[in-house]
Amino acid sequence: MVVQHNLSAFNTNRMLGLNNTSLAKSTEKLSSGYRINRAADDAAGLAISEKMRRQIRGLTQASANCQDGVSLCQIADGALNEVHDILKRCEELAVQAANDTNTSEDRDYIQMELDELSKEIDRIHQTTVFNNQNIFSDLGITPSAKSNSLVGIENGSMLSDGKFSFLTENGIYVEVGVVDVNNQPIPTPGDAQATGDVNSAAVANSAMASFVQQAAADAVSKLAGAYPQLFAAASTDSIQVGLELGNIDGPSNTLANASLKMSGNGSSTVMSYRLKVDTSDYNISDFNSYSDDKKADLAAVIAHEMTHLVMFDTVTGSMVGSDTFPLWFIEGTAQTSSGDNGWMNALDSSSSDADIKKYMGNILTQPYGAGYLATMYLGMAASGKDPATASDVTGKNITDGLDKILTAVAKGDPFEKAIADATNNKFSSATDFVNKFKSASGDSLDFARNLINAKGANGSGSALYGLGTAEKDAFAPSQLNGNHSSYAINKDNSWYSNGFGSNIAWPDNTGTDGNGEGFKIQAGAEKGQYIHINQYNIRANALFGGMKMDVTGNYTNPVSGTSGMNAQSVTLNDAAARGNTIDIIKEADRRVSVIRSYYGATQNRLEHTIKNLDNIVENTTAAESLIRDTDMAKEMVHYSNSNILSQAGQTMLAQANQSKQGILSLLQ
C-alpha cells in the first residue's frame, strides 16, 4: 500500500473530466438546438452548412426581387389598361366623326378631344413609375405591323437609310441606327459612299482589284475549311469588306493591311472592315505585267490579312478589347495561313539544336518568325497529336488545334483557359506556354525540327496551302479559285456595316435610371441569374406609328408602309382622313395588346419563378437542418448517459479519496 500516489483517484478524476466535457457539449447542443456550434464540432459539415445558408439567403432575396418584378408588371399592365380605355374612346370618336351628319365644326370639337386623349397617353408614358424609375421609355421598343420575315437578330437586315432592323420572337420590331463614333451614318453595302474618294471605275475594274478580290475569296474559302468551328461561331455568313488601293508606307515595306472600325450608338456595336493594298509596291496600271511569283507573294500577304479580318469578327474582344491576344499569337496565327514569308530562312535541316533554341527564344520580339513557329506548335499541341512525331506534323493537325482554341475564345473563354483546356493542361496559361517554348523544353524542340523538315528548303510553311508547297505554287494566280460568301471584298473604298462582332455582345440595357430599355430582375443567388423585363415606348406618336389621329383632314401624315429615306407624306382630306384615323387607332390598339400580353406573360413567368425559388429555399433549408440542427431525442440520450456517468464519477472519486484512510490504522 502506498500513500504518495492515489492512482485510483487519478483515474477516476480523469474519467470524470471526460464525462463532464461530454456533458457540457450535450448541454450546449440541447440549449442551442444546433449540432454544430463551432468548426471543431464538424469542419466539413460547417462548410457545407454555411454554403447552403448563403444560398438560402440569396434565394430568399431573389424571390423578393421577383415579387418586385411582378409588381412592376402589374403597374405597367394597369397603365396600359388605361391606354386601352383611351383608345376605345378614340375609336368611338373616330367612328362618330366618320358620320356625315357631323358638320366641320362638330369634327373640330371631336379633334380637340382626340388631341387631349393623345396628350394623356403621353402623360401616362412619362409618369408611370416604379420606385422612382420610369417603367416606359422613349428609348424603349414598340410593336410594329411589320411582317415576321425578320424575326431574330440573325434574320435582320440593313434598311435603305443605314439602319439595322429585326423582329423579336414576340413581334417587337427593333430598328437600330448604325453610326460611327462621330454619330455619322456608316455606309451600307447598297451605298456608294466612302471614307474619302470612291474608287474610280479604272481602279474598281482594274486587274489588280480583281486579283485581290479572288485571292481574298480563295483565302477565306480555305480558312473556312480549316476552321469550321470558328466560322460557325461567326456573327454572320455575309460579312462585307471595302477595298482601298493606295500608298501605305512606301515601297518594300507593308504590302497590305486589314482594318477594323468599331462604333455604336448605345444600342449596338457595329463592325466595319477594309482591306488596303500598297500601290507603292503594286502599281495598278502595271499589275498585268508582274510575274506570277510577285502576284503569289501578294496573295500570300492577302491570306495573312484575311486571317486578321476573320479574327476581328470571330474573336473581336481578344483582338481589340481590354484582354487582347499577345502579339506573337495574333501575327503567328495569320502567318500560319500565309506561311513564314521567309522569316524562318535562318533555319534549315542542318541547323543545330542551339541555333533552333536561340531562334525560339525570340517569340516575344519576333512575332512574324518565332511567333509563327510558336503558334504552329501551340496548334499541334492542342490537336491531340504528337508534336515529336514527324508524320503527325501536318497543316490540318495544326489548324485543328488552333480551331479549338479560337472557338473557345469566340464562345467566351479567356485565352489562358482556352490554352489550358485545349492542351489538357500541358500548358496552364499563355505565360506558361511562352516560358516553356522559349526554353525549348518538352517536345517543342522536336516539333521545330519536324516543321523545318516538313517545309523543306523551298516550302511556304502555310498550314492552309501546304507546308512543303512553295509560295509561288501555293499562291499561283491559276490556283486561286476558291469562293466563300463571307468576308467578301467589294471593289469600292468603303467601310461596310456588318452588324456586330461575334463576342461583342449587344449591351445589357439595365435601366438603372429608368431610361434604359429594360430592367434586370436578379432571380437567383449567383451572378448572371437574371430575368430581363423590356421597357416600351408607349407615346402616342409611337403607338400611332408616327401618324396622327385626324378627323378634319388638316394634318399631314406619312403614307402607310413608307419610312426612313423613302418616307412620303400626304394630306388626307375629309373621308380619307377619317378612315385613316380608324385604321391608326386599330393598329395602336393592337400594339398596346402586344405590350400588355408581354407584361402579362412576364408576370406569369415571374410568379412561377417565385414558386420555384421558394421551393428551393424550403428544400435547401431542410437539407441544411439535417446537417446543422441537433436531434433532440438522440442528444437527450447522450446527455442522460453523460449526466449519470458524471454523478457516478463524483461518487467514485469520493470513494477513491477515502481508500487510503485504512493506512492510518496500520500506523497506530
Image (tube, helix red, strand yellow):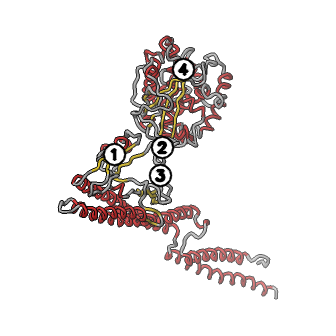
Q: Residue at x 36, y 45 (%)?
A: 166
User: Which residue is outermost to the right?
Assistant: 668
Give residue 461's quadrant in the image. top right
Precedes in sequence: disc 1 or disc 2: 1
Q: In this figure, which residue is indicated by the disc labeled 3?
A: 508
The label number, if any, that marks residue 279 in the structure image: 4
| Observer able to see residue 303 | yes
Q: Earlier in the sequence, mark 1 or mark 3?
A: 1
- Residue depth check, mark 3 versus mark 2: number of the one nearer the observer: 2
Q: Quadrant of the N terminus?
A: bottom right
Near mark 4 (Cα within 10 A), the count class, few <14, some 14-19 or many ≥20, is many
Q: CA distance from mark 3 to mark 2?
A: 12 Å
| Identity, as a three-letter code, of the amino acid under mark 4 | Thr
Q: Position of residue 603 (x, y in %)?
A: 36, 63
Question: Secondary structure beneath disc 1?
Answer: loop
Label 1 neighbour load within 10 Å: few <14, some 14-19, many 20+: some
Q: Is residue 611 visible?
A: no
Q: Amino acid at mark 1?
A: Val
Q: Looking at the picture, which amino acid does disc 3 mark?
A: Asp
